[in-house]
């Protein structure tokens, strides 16, 4: 009777630990970001922290996530199969949304030079909200303008990264 019963079929080692590949890619990307951030020429920050801080934080976070993922996989953790998502994989892609988002990004690229970041960023944020389904024509532009101004001030005043202000330069 000891020969009968259910046996657990083991997968080959490369399938059992295939998710370690994601961890390796994340770690390599983190090291690349850190090396690039550390090798940036030192720019004395006139106001606040310098532009190298964000890449250092992102690189460190990538390495931390890679280590945590590797630990989880080595302890037997597995990602959920694709069926766990509540989407219909047979449905066609939503190209209208993709094209609207691409148009919002392209508008930002075209407008940032002549109009500055506060205006082009507002167009980007509003365009993204519209593309993703929001249709509140009073709230959305106000939120987009607020996000754009906050982003402008964070980069310009706190991080010391100069963004083009455009015609609003004298006002802001």
Image (spheres, rainbow, N blue to C red):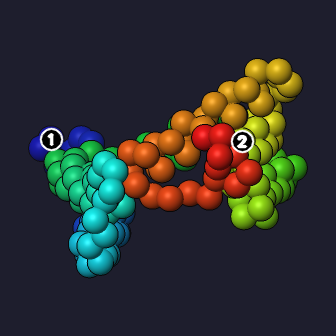
Residue 150: image x %, image y %? Answer: 54, 36
Give the quarter of the figure containing the C terminus.
top right
9 left or right of 122? left
Q: Is residue 11 visible?
A: no
Residue furthest front as drawn: 170
Residue found at x 63% / y 31%: 146
Instruction: Give me the residue at 33% from left, 56% from top.
Output: 46
Residue 96: x and y in percent read: 87, 49
Please tell me which residue lies in front, 27 or 85. Answer: 27
Figure quadrant of residue 122: top right
Residue 53 appearing in the image: yes
Given residues 54 and 78, the one toward you in this image is 54
Q: Residues within 10 Å of mark 1 (few under 14, many from 20)?
A: few
The quarter of the picture where residue 39 lies is bottom left
168 sits left or right of 21 in the view: right
Tell me residue 14's x, y (percent).
30, 70
> Residue 5, relative to residue 15: is it above or below?
above
Residue at point 73% right, 26% down?
A: 142
Q: Which residue is mark 2?
A: 122
């Amino acid at each position: 009777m000891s020969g009968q019963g259910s046996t657990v079929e083991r997968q080959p080692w490369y399938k059992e630990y295939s998710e370690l590949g994601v961890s390796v890619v994340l770690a390599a990307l983190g090291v690349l970001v850190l090396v690039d951030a550390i090798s940036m020429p030192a720019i004395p920050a006139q106001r606040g922290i310098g532009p190298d801080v964000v890449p250092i934080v992102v690189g460190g976070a990538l390495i931390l996530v890679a280590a945590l993922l590797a630990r989880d996989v080595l302890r037997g953790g597995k990602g959920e199969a694709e069926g766990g998502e509540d989407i219909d994989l047979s449905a066609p892609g939503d190209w209208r949304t993709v094209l609207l988002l691409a148009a919002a990004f392209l508008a930002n690229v075209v407008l940032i030079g002549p109009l500055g970041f506060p205006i082009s960023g507002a167009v980007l944020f509003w365009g993204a909200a519209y593309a993703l389904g929001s249709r509140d024509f009073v709230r959305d532009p106000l939120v987009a303008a607020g996000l754009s101004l906050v982003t402008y001030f964070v980069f310009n005043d706190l991080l010391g990264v100069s963004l083009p202000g455009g015609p609003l330069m004298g006002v802001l």
